[in-house]
Image (spheres, rainbow, N blue to C red):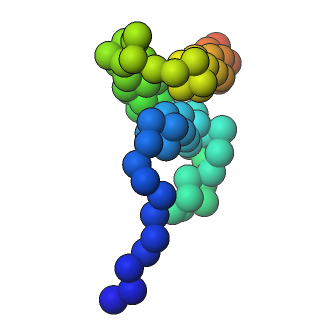
């Protein structure tokens, strides 16, 4: 079996993974497995909550770039969540 080369685990990968999960649950991007877009506000809210926990628990321990990454990811995904929740999805 061939070993797959992966990047070193890093905070930016975790943030982007959680933000991508939320975007999939909001139907902002297609599910990579099914190719479909579906909206689940509760699952998206869970991913947003995980990002919020990460932000809170790492507060004071992040570089300016890392803090900005989390803030931007949360801002974008919160706006998408609000847009979908106002649509009555």
User: Where is residue 11 shown, x and y percent of the image?
Assistant: 45, 36
Q: Residue furthest bottom?
A: 1
In this view, the residue in front, 24 or 54, is: 54
Give the image quarter of residue 82. Answer: top right
Q: Position of residue 3 (x, y in %)?
A: 38, 79
Locate the N terminus and report the quarter of the image it occupies.
bottom left
Q: Position of residue 79 (x, y in %)?
A: 65, 17
In this rendering, would 86 be left or right of 44? right
Q: Residue at x 51, y 62 (%)?
A: 33
Total labels: the figure holds: 0
The quadrant in which the C terminus is found is top right
| Position above or below: 22 against 78 | below
Q: Is residue 78 left or right of residue 62?
A: right
Question: Picture coordinates of residue 8 (x, y %)?
Answer: 43, 53
**Depth order, front residue of 31/15:** 15
> Which residue is depicted at the point 39% across and 86% down?
2
């Amino acid at each position: 079996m061939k070993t797959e080369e992966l990047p070193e685990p890093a905070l930016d990968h975790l943030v982007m993974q959680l933000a991508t999960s939320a975007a999939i649950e909001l139907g902002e991007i297609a599910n990579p497995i099914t190719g479909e877009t579906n909206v689940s506000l509760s699952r998206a809210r869970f991913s947003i909550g995980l990002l919020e926990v990460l932000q809170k628990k790492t507060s004071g321990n992040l570089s300016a770039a890392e803090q900005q990454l989390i803030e931007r990811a949360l801002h974008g995904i919160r706006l998408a969540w609000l847009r979908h929740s106002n649509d009555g999805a």
